[in-house]
């Protein structure tokens, strides 16, 4: 039998409900924050990611799914969401039509050819936001507050922001020089990846997982000491606005983020999972990305969070997503003769806002009760010859087992009184 590709997974059964629940929660959160939904293609011209995400970023150099289409064009399955959203912002001239800030959110699959392991897949889902046009510390704090609020709403404990700044271009260049000078004597001790990073982007040496324990890493220069005054003030203001929202944060100079395009604020949000801090998402400010991709100078800030990691930590923490929404009414016919009336009745219930299901397989009376239980039906409705002739329905409360004969005209008000409306 043909099996699914390595690093992918199917969503089946209860998992589907959990994912839809998370999506619904995010959709309603984004409405409250007044962000608009944006959807871009899953594949883009390869060049977009090389120019956008950066030539020294692992996800572009080693992990993309590249292919040629039938007209020999170079295409890439998107490894992240930002580059496509920026392209769309430019191509649709949103910089001319939108009032700033233009606040956008997306949700969809991303593709990276990584070694699959716990919580890491080759196809995975990210929710993210991208905000254009506001070079404002308040904006950064708002963006950071989105995953923080979301994780808290889900009931995660110890939600904390790790934040750092990379400063503006001037500060970054000063820091870049200091890092080259500092790391040069240690090149021989570095892993192969860091040797390459030394030449291309020494900042990335700081977030190397392999070399992090080495002595020379501990006393590496810190960006904070190379910030010019504008960058310092910007960062202080971000912290001030985080304070205003009473968000728990810690300045962590080892956070540099894997992507080349960040300036100023970079952050990760973590939660406490079984006593350990666990990073769940990350993002930052990218004031030159829009220009790099060929647009007018436009500041941006955003973040992305992965669904898979989140779902596994929710499981570890035994947090149940209120996803097992039971069906309101299970309807069946007493004999095959009433199937048509039953079918129409089920549809009428659905159109009036109730979830309803029925028997499509001519089950026996008892088997229908079993099925109603499996679906968790709150009410069972039975329609037989007598019901059809006299325009009523027999309802059974599946909890109390009480029985009611309800005239067709009163069915909706009967159910309205008994079944609470769900969000
Ligand atoms: P990044 O785009 O690398 O900054 O990642 C943002 C978030 O996406 C991470 O915190 C993870 O939750 C998630 N993520 C990144 N890569 C993967 C992957 N291969 N599989 C599952 N989730 C991922």
Image (cartoon, rainbow, N blue to C red):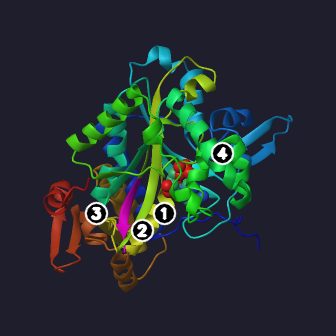
Which residues make up the magenta segment? 269-274
Q: Is residue 160 left or right of residue 282?
A: left
Judged left or right of residue 175, residue 189 is right
Tell me if the residue at label 1 has its CB under 8 Å from ligand 1.
Answer: yes
Give me the C-alpha separation between circle 1 and circle 2: 6 Å
Are the two marked residues, 3 and 1, in contact with CB atoms closer than 8 angstroms?
no
Label 4: few (<14), some (14–19) or many (≥20) C-alpha neighbours in 10 Å: many
Labels 1 and 2 touching (C-beta < 8 A): yes
Q: Which residue is mark 2?
A: 313
Residue 247: % across, % down: 26, 49
Q: Which residue is mark 3?
A: 155
Q: Secondary structure at mark 2?
A: helix
Q: Earlier in the sequence, mark 3 or mark 1?
A: 3
Q: Specify the farthest residue to the top.
A: 96
Q: Dot 1: few (<14), some (14–19), or many (≥20) neighbours within 10 Å?
A: many
Residue at the (85%, 39%) spot, across then down: 70
Question: Which-is-in-front pick, marks 3 and 4?
Answer: 4
Residue to which mark 4 is pinned: 57
Counting residues from the N terminus, which is met first, the one under dot 2 or under dot 4?
4
- Residue nearer the viewer, 331 or 128: 128
């Amino acid at each position: 039998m043909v099996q699914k590709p390595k690093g992918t997974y199917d969503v089946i059964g209860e998992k589907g409900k959990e994912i839809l629940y998370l999506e619904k929660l995010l959709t309603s959160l984004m409405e409250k924050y007044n962000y608009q939904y944006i959807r871009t293609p899953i594949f883009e011209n390869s060049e977009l990611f090389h120019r956008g995400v950066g030539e020294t970023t692992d996800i572009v150099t080693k992990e993309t799914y590249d292919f040629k289409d039938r007209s020999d064009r170079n295409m890439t399955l998107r490894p992240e969401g930002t580059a496509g959203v920026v392209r769309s912002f430019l191509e649709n001239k949103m910089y001319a039509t939108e009032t700033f800030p233009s606040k956008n959110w997306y949700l969809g699959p991303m593709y990276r050819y990584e070694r699959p392991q716990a919580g890491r897949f080759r196809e995975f889902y990210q929710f993210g936001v991208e905000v254009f046009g506001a070079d404002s510390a308040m904006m950064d704090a708002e963006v950071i507050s989105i995953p923080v609020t979301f994780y808290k709403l889900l009931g995660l404990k110890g939600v904390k922001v790790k934040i750092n700044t990379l400063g503006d271009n001037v500060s970054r260049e000063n820091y870049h020089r200091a890092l080259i000078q500092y790391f040069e004597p240690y090149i021989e001790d570095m892993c192969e990846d860091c040797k390459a990073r030394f030449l291309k982007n020494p900042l990335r040496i700081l977030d190397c997982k392999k070399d992090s324990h080495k002595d020379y890493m501990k006393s590496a220069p810190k960006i904070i000491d190379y910030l010019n005054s504008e960058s310092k003030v910007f960062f202080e203001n971000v912290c001030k606005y985080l304070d205003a929202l009473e968000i728990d944060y810690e300045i962590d100079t080892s956070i540099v983020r894997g992507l080349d395009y960040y300036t100023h604020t970079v952050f990760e949000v973590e939660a406490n999972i079984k006593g350990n801090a666990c990073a769940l998402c990350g993002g930052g400010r990218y004031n030159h990305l829009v220009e790099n991709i060929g647009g007018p100078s436009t500041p941006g800030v955003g973040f992305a969070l992965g669904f898979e990691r989140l779902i596994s930590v929710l499981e570890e923490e035994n947090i149940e997503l209120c996803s097992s929404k039971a069906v309101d009414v299970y309807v069946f016919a007493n004999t095959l003769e009433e199937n048509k009336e039953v079918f129409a009745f089920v549809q009428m219930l659905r159109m009036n806002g109730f979830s309803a299901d029925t028997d499509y397989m001519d089950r026996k009376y008892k088997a229908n009760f079993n099925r109603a239980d499996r679906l968790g039906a709150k009410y069972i409705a039975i329609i037989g010859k007598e019901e059809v002739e006299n325009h009523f329905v027999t309802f059974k409360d599946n909890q109390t087992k009480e029985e009611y004969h309800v005239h067709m005209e009163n069915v909706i008000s009967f159910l309205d009184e008994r079944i609470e409306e769900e969000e």
